[in-house]
């Protein structure tokens, strides 16, 4: 095996480019499509609330409303928030599930649950049964988001992990665009097919994912933690072999094995309590804070209610503006992925996103306060909402899951990311449940002045990112384990010199010498 180290040499950066890692990128893309479902569902269901065909069944006639119908705020809260409540519950149990079955099995289960939930929602005209379908599809979405992002984090090379895990935001936005476009073309139907068509389209992503998972290897790190080293090696070869040079492959594999062995030596078991012990407590709190900042940005309010929000504000072409915003978000994700890879680190891009988000919400709120019924208020609202969706997806949206999955230890990743995701869903549920009370004309009727709350929460995010968030760009997961174990302050992460890679390289070098190889490819790796 070691003699194969002589066969390939590369003068490029260790680990290779995206093209060099195209097999791993393709596999991560397949798994990350699971996130499309959440974006599609959120956009589609949010827009249904401004669709006469849907409101004729689940709402009531209201001549005073610009769209001729309205919906009770309680029904509105439940059909939107039960998705996040179900996601909260499934994310909460994701850690326990992962102790017995792998990432692929969890995603397959989510596909099956999604199919059942879609059938329930398409067939029913009962609000109670609709609520059940929303809760069940939320449970499926919790597994989709948690396990797809855990998998991509564990499968991606260190220098490309930001890009590959950011596929979360990439696919969420594609799903949002598709959901908004399909709603736009079915909104003019005045019968039940107006909302049954978007609901039926929720079968598409899980079907593609279900088939694609047959060609995806299990996470090598999960297999190592299960004591299945042979299967882990085979899975790792499917992800890397033939796309990077053999020296890089052997060193990354040896580093992964060593990291898992060191984690196992520190803990004899893996349980939810371990997240709140020793150095893992800090990592857990940072992960929770990162996911909470997603909700604190105000994005879930706009994803769930922007079409209805535009409609009750008297803005024409509400559906078209929603499509525009989702397209801008998609453009933002691509720019954010490039920026994380080539321009700035995680910490800087998070601070930029929170700052712009704060200013966008504040501007909309001030414009509404100054001239609530003015003809210029509508364009201001559309402009700053569009700017927010672009900046959020380019910054916080693109970086949130790469950061959250990097922050936690390998043995606790499913537990910590799962419970953090459940916290995010709980906060999103709280947002979706309370937002109609603020914006619905029959309740507080704040309208755009609701932005004052989100401007304040974005300001708190800026403080959190500045004082607490470390810079982790370019570090392997095993290196991050070492840095956190050394209790390095957040500001000193970039300058810390890790020893785990050097130890692995020395081990590989010793093996080369024993095998009669004196060309020192491992040493060359470290020099690069």
Image (cartoon, helix red, strand yellow):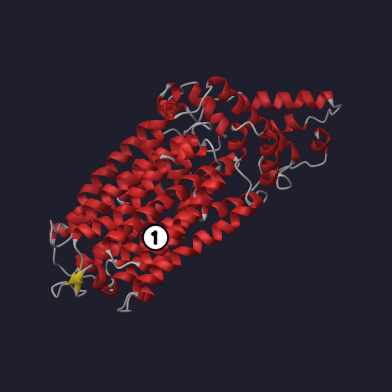
**What kind of element bears circle 1?**
helix
Give the residue drawn at x 27%, y 69%: 50
At x 67%, y 33%, the residue is: 229
**Extreme residue in the right direction:** 516
* Total marks in image: 1
Residue 10 percent coordinates (x, y): 74, 42
Q: Residue at x 65, y 52 (%)?
A: 22
Vertically, is 428 above or below 275? below
Quadrant placement of the C terminus: top right
Quadrant of the drawing holding the N terminus? top right
Does residue 132 lie above or below 15 as drawn?
A: below
Horizontal side of residue 68 vs 43, given as left or right: left
Which residue is disc 1 drawn over?
41
Asked if residue 280 shows in the view, the reply is yes
Q: Where is residue 288 in the image (x, y as percent from the top left)?
A: 38, 36
Residue 332 figure quarter: bottom left
Q: Where is residue 167 in the image (x, y as percent from the top left)?
A: 51, 52
Q: In the image shown, does 116 or 56 lie closer to the viewer?
A: 116
Q: Quadrant of residue 330?
A: bottom left
- Closer to the camera, 463 or 267? 267
Question: Is residue 297 visible to us here?
Answer: no
Q: Which of 90 and 462 is in front in this view?
A: 90
Q: In the displayed structure, would residue 215 be above or below residue 154?
A: below
Give the quadrant of residue 465.
top left
- Quick one: label 1, few (<14), some, or many (20+) residues within 10 Å? many
| Residue 194 relative to residue 362: left or right | right
Compared to 446, does 419 lie above or below? above
Q: Along the horizontal axis of the image, is 19 left or right of 299? A: right
Point out residue 25 in the picture as x, y percentages from the top left corner.
61, 51
């Amino acid at each position: 095996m070691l003699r194969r180290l002589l066969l390939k040499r590369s003068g490029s950066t260790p680990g290779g480019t995206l093209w060099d890692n195209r097999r791993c990128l393709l596999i991560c893309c397949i798994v990350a499509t699971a996130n499309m479902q959440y974006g599609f569902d959120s956009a589609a269901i949010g827009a249904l609330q401004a669709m006469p065909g849907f409101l004729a069944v689940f709402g009531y006639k209201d001549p005073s409303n610009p769209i001729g119908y309205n919906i009770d705020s309680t029904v509105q809260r439940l059909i939107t928030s039960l998705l996040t409540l179900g996601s909260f519950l499934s994310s909460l149990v994701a850690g326990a599930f992962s102790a017995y079955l792998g990432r692929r099995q969890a995603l397959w289960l989510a596909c099956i649950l999604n199919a059942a939930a879609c059938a329930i929602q398409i067939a029913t005209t009962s609000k109670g049964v609709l609520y059940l379908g929303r809760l069940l599809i939320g449970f499926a979405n919790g597994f989709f988001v948690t396990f797809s992002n855990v998998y991509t984090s564990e499968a991606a090379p260190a220098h490309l992990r930001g890009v590959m895990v950011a596929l979360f935001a990439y696919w969420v936005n594609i799903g949002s665009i598709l959901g908004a476009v399909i709603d736009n073309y079915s909104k003019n139907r005045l019968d039940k097919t107006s909302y049954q068509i978007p609901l039926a389209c929720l079968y598409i992503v899980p079907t593609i994912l279900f088939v694609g998972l047959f060609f995806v290897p299990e996470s090598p790190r999960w297999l190592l933690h299960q004591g299945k080293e042979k299967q882990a090696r085979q899975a790792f070869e499917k992800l890397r072999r033939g796309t990077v040079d053999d020296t890089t492959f052997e060193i990354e594999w040896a580093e992964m094995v060593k990291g898992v062995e060191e984690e196992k030596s520190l803990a004899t078991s893996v349980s939810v309590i371990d997240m709140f012990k020793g150095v893992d407590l800090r990592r857990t709190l940072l992960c929770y804070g990162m996911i909470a900042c997603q909700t604190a940005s105000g994005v879930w309010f706009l994803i769930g209610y922007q079409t209805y929000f535009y409609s009750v504000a008297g803005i024409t072409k509400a559906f078209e503006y929603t499509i525009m915003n989702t397209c801008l978000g998609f453009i933002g994700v691509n720019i954010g992925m490039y920026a994380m890879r080539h321009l700035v680190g995680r910490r800087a891009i998070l601070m930029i996103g929170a700052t712009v988000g704060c200013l966008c919400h504040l501007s909309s709120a001030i414009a509404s306060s100054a001239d609530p019924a003015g003809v210029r208020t509508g364009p201001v609202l559309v402009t700053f909402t569009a700017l927010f969706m672009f900046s959020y997806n380019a910054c916080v949206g693109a970086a949130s899951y790469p950061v959250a999955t990097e922050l936690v230890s390998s043995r606790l990743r499913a537990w910590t990311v799962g419970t953090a995701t459940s916290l995010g869903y709980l906060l999103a549920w709280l947002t979706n449940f309370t937002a109609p009370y603020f914006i619905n004309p029959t309740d507080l009727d704040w309208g755009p002045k609701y932005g004052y709350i989100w401007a304040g929460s974005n300001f708190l995010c800026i403080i959190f990112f500045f004082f607490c968030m470390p810079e982790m760009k370019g570090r392997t997961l095993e290196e991050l384990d070492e840095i956190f174990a050394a209790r390095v302050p957040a500001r000193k992460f970039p300058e810390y010199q890790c020893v785990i890679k050097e130890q692995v390289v020395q081990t590989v070098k010793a093996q080369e010498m024993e095998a009669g190889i004196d060309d020192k490819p491992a040493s060359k790796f470290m020099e690069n």
